[in-house]
Image (tube, rainbow, N blue to C red):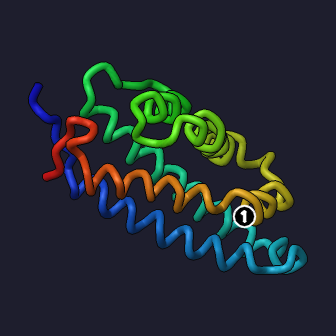
Amino acid sequence: MTARIIKRQSIIPRIDGIQHDYEKLKSLAELPLELFQEEDNFVKAQFYLRRALEGILNIGSHILTRIPGSRITEYKQVATRLGELGIVDRSFADSNLKAMAGYRNRLTHFYADVTHQEIYSILKNNLEDIPRFLSYIKRLLDKPEIFNLKIE
């Protein structure tokens, strides 16, 4: 079977953007809740978190479009399929990555319902899911042949 091609130019800029957003979110997570609740900080956190989650899901979607039988129609399916294929750890996919996909939808479609406390809690308790996801993608980029892929 011929290896499918992953386009480096489709992945690397997104990784860079996610890392940038992650650093911004880490800074916001260091604020005490009282300062975080100031409107500008809350809005920044929503923006950086939504953008990081979109980048994660776009990377996952790009990879899956290169694997036969892996086209998806919903973001939560990205998580499930990446786990099934072993691209990310299955338990991480089924819990953390699915939750990330769901939260991206909440930030996009139900943004008026998002509270300061829930975003702050995510920054304090779940932010490390972002570099964990990126570590799986970096492994794929380093050893694409494991997944019958090729990087160009």
Residue most extreme to the left: 2
Q: Which residue is mark 1?
A: 123
Residue at image location 65% in from the left, 74% down from the top? 26
Query: Could you say whether the residue bearing mark 1 is in a helix, strand or loop?
Result: helix
Residue at image location 20% in from the left, 40% down from the top? 149
When the figure is inspected, residue 145 is found, relative to residue 73, above or below; the finding is below
Of 28 and 142, nearer the camera is: 142
**In the displayed structure image, the side of residue 68 where residue 102 appears, left or right:** right
Image spot of residue 114 (x, y percent): 78, 50
When the figure is inspected, residue 141 is found, relative to residue 102, above or below; the finding is below
Image spot of residue 55 (x, y percent): 45, 53
Of 101 and 111, nearer the camera is: 101
**In the displayed structure image, the side of residue 38 where residue 133 appears, left or right:** left
Image spot of residue 94 (x, y percent): 60, 33
Residue 17 sits in quarter: bottom left
When the figure is inspected, residue 31 is found, relative to residue 89, above or below; the finding is below
Residue most extreme to the right: 34
Residue most extreme to the top: 69
Screen quadrant of the N terminus: top left
Residue at image location 17% in from the left, 50% down from the top? 151
Residue at image location 37% in from the left, 59% down from the top? 14
Q: Amino acid at mark 1?
A: Leu
How crowded pointer 1 is (Cα within 10 Å; few <14, some 14-19, many 20+) is rated as many
Image spot of residue 16 (x, y percent): 38, 68
| Picture mark count | 1
